Image (spheres, rainbow, N blue to C red):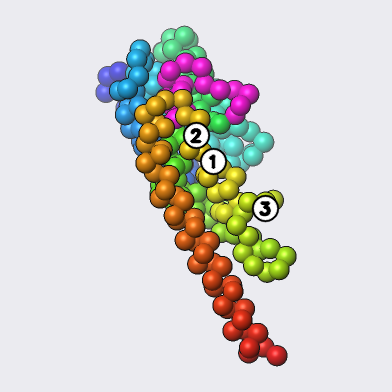
């Protein structure tokens, strides 16, 4: 891939990004993660991989506006149309499309080829560790969801059985469980290195919130008669 083609893809990507939790810097991190993983794999088509990484989240705006849509499916179609319109071969565009459409975690639509598996793992890595915590908190702020929910007794829920969305609910539902089932050994290795950071942050935040409610309610009861 030459600089001109890279620039074309990058410009299109930037024009589609409209979400601070899924911004162009997220895309670059996914790309750099993918290149790190690709060094440990064989027979990687770097032209397909780089293009798929750059364009993997271009359907985010459509999903944000209509949650019934899947950004991976929309993004794959947009990428295919863009590539064909700009003179890329249909076979190449189809490979990019398939990689993008399988990067989102769905058991019914897993990645098949090595480029798709690398993209899947690289994107998943950007939800791990400290950066995954930070991105999740940013997104929760964008959609006006709280850090946690309260239990019927007024204490802080750890998120495990919550139905209402919150950061703690997202942690228990998604973040806590993403450190397995990577397709590549390199991604699994990096994720393992990051895991404890996320665990420690969640535990500290939960403990601090609980202490505030426990001690605060005792003091309030002393004052309010």
Which label is found at residue 177? 1
**Disc on res. 180:** 2
The N terminus lies in quadrant: top left
Q: Residues within 10 Å of mark 2 (few under 14, many from 20)?
A: few
Residue 7 makes an appearance in the image: yes
Q: Quadrant of residue 63?
A: top right
> Viewer-nearest of labels 3 and 2?
2
The answer to whether the residue labelled 1 contacts the one labelled 2, judged by CB atoms less than 8 Å apart, is yes
Mark 3 highlights which residue? 162
| Magenta residue check for 131 | no
Count of numbered circles in the view: 3
Residue 37 or 88: which is nearer the viewer?
Answer: 37
Please tell me which residue is depicted at 49% across the width and 61% down the height of the picture.
205
Mark toward the start of the polypeptide (3 vs 1): 3
Q: Residue at x 37, y 36 (%)?
A: 190
Pointer 3 or 2: first along the chain: 3
Contact, mark 3 vs mark 2 (Cβ under 8 Å): no
Q: Whole-percent x and y of residue 57?
A: 48, 33
The image quadrant where one finds the C terminus is: bottom right
Tell me the SS state at disc 1.
helix
**Alpha carbon distance from label 1 to label 2:** 7 Å
The residues tagged by marks 3 and 2 sit, at their Cα atoms, a distance apart of 23 Å
Question: Dot 3: few (<14), some (14–19), or many (≥20) neighbours within 10 Å?
Answer: some
Front residue (pair 106, 72): 106
Using the image, determine if residue 203 lies above or below residue 17.
below
| Image-based side of 135 in relation to 10, left or right | right
Tell me the CA gap for discs 3 and 1. 16 Å
At a point 52% along the width and 21% down the height, the residue shown is 111
Start-end of magenta stretch: 106-122
In the displayed structure, would residue 223 be above or below residue 188? below
State the SS at label 3: loop
Image location (x, y in percent) of residue 70: 60, 32
């Amino acid at each position: 891939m030459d600089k001109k083609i890279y620039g074309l893809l990058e410009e299109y990507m930037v024009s589609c990004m409209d979400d601070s939790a899924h911004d162009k810097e997220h895309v670059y991190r996914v790309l750099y993660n993918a290149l790190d993983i690709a060094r440990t794999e064989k027979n990687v088509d770097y032209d397909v991989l780089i293009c798929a990484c750059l364009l993997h989240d271009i359907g985010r705006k459509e999903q944000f506006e209509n949650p019934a849509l899947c950004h991976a499916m929309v993004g794959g179609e947009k990428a295919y149309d863009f590539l064909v319109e700009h003179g890329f071969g249909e076979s190449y565009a189809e490979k990019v499309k398939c990689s993008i459409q399988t990067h989102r975690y769905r058991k019914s639509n897993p990645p098949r080829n090595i480029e798709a598996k690398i993209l899947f793992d690289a994107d998943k890595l950007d939800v791990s560790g400290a950066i995954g915590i930070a991105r999740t908190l940013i997104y929760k702020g964008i959609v006006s969801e709280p850090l946690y929910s309260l239990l019927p007794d007024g204490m802080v829920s750890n998120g495990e059985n919550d139905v209402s969305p919150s950061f703690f609910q997202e942690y228990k539902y998604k973040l806590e469980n993403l450190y397995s089932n990577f397709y590549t050994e390199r991604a699994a290795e990096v994720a393992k290195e990051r895991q404890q950071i996320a665990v420690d942050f969640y535990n500290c935040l939960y403990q601090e919130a609980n202490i505030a409610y426990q001690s605060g309610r005792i003091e309030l009861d002393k004052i309010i008669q």
